[in-house]
Amino acid sequence: MANEKLLEIKNLKQHFKVGKSVVKAVDGLTFDIYKGETFGLVGESGCGKSTTGRTIIRLYDATDGEVIFDGENVHGKKNAKELKKFNRKMQMIFQDPYASLNPRMTVADIIAEGIDIHGLAKNKEERMARVHELLETVGLNKEHANRYPHEFSGGQRQRIGIARALAVDPEFIIADEPISALDVSIQAQVVNLMKKLQREKGLTYLFIAHDLSMVKYISDRIGVMYQGEIVELADSDELYADPLHPYTQSLLSAIPLPDPEYERSRTRKLYDSEDYAPKSGEKRVLREVKKGHWVACTEEEYEQFMATV
């Protein structure tokens, strides 16, 4: 994997006003995503993962911070032409395959929407040939083109969503919990399809999920998110082998294994943010405790980590 940065997130914040209070959905994220990799973003529901993805792709305007994609500020002022160019480079696969497809449109029109907007087909024949090619790419048949979303299963609908995202030949895809609404038997099929497409097309993914076992399977690096902040970031294997933050340890302790002996003795480690609050009152910040392994910690905790490395 080349160490060429495709996406740089710098102190990203997304705050929402709810009545008189402010909800800090994303509160100071900083991380990079490199070309050709899959960066997994995990955490429990409500931690800000999906909001992060939607802010990166400009569905929400950032409250503060920067999103640099291909050297350009995503949230800088852009005219219609520049926005169109950006939208072609970055696409999104949504969580709910039932709600994300227009029930009144045929599969062909859903997939070809981006092709039409960006003028990627010279005529109707070329447009339909591209739709058929995309359907076959995601494991469906060209006969499916004239059907409507309600005629398909959840897994098939998600494949249609993937085909729609691929239609404009993007460089970067944000996959927002793309398998959470699917049966377990279908989840692996969709993830394997995404890995295959990544190899063939050189795609870069931000894979957002709460299922740590699936995230480990698809991701090169993983960021663990808690209450709008990243608390740990490391290579996939490293994070699983040596989780350092108590919240990461808690998430990993909850993963079941198909081993009755292990399950009988498995102890779930609970995480209490109040118990873990720094006694000094110092704010924890991400620090690199091993090469490529970052943990949110105080200065004192950092010294303790470094002493054990």
Image: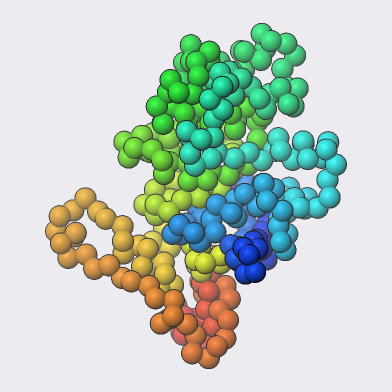
- Which quadrant of the structure image shows residue 283? bottom right
Q: Nearer the viewer, residue 6 or 229?
A: 229
Task: Give the answer, above or below, for where 81 lies relative to 251.
Answer: above
Give how far across and how far down residue 152 sits, in percent. Answer: 42, 23
Q: Residue furthest bottom?
A: 280
Side (left or right) of 80 relative to 173: right
The image shows residue 55, relative to residue 136, as above or below, that is below
Q: Is residue 32 left or right of residue 244?
A: right
Query: How many tags in the picture?
Result: 0
Identify which residue, 62 or 301, lies in the foreground: 62
Indicate the position of residue 227 as horizontal and vertical percent values.
52, 67
* Vertical side of 306 occupied by 117: above or below: above
Quick one: quadrant of the C terminus? Answer: bottom left
Give above or below for 152 relative to 277: above
Judge whether residue 234 can be spotted in this image: no
Q: Residue at x 41, y 66 (%)?
A: 248
* Left or right relative to 68: residue 132: left
Residue 66, position as x, y percentages in the image: 73, 59
Q: Residue at 70% of width from left, 35% of height from top?
A: 88
Q: Residue furthest top?
A: 125
Tell me the residue at 71%/38% (across/down). Answer: 87
Q: Is residue 58 left or right of residue 78?
A: left
The residue nearer to you, when weighing 274 against 247, is 274
Q: Give the image location of residue 83, x and y in percent.
A: 78, 40
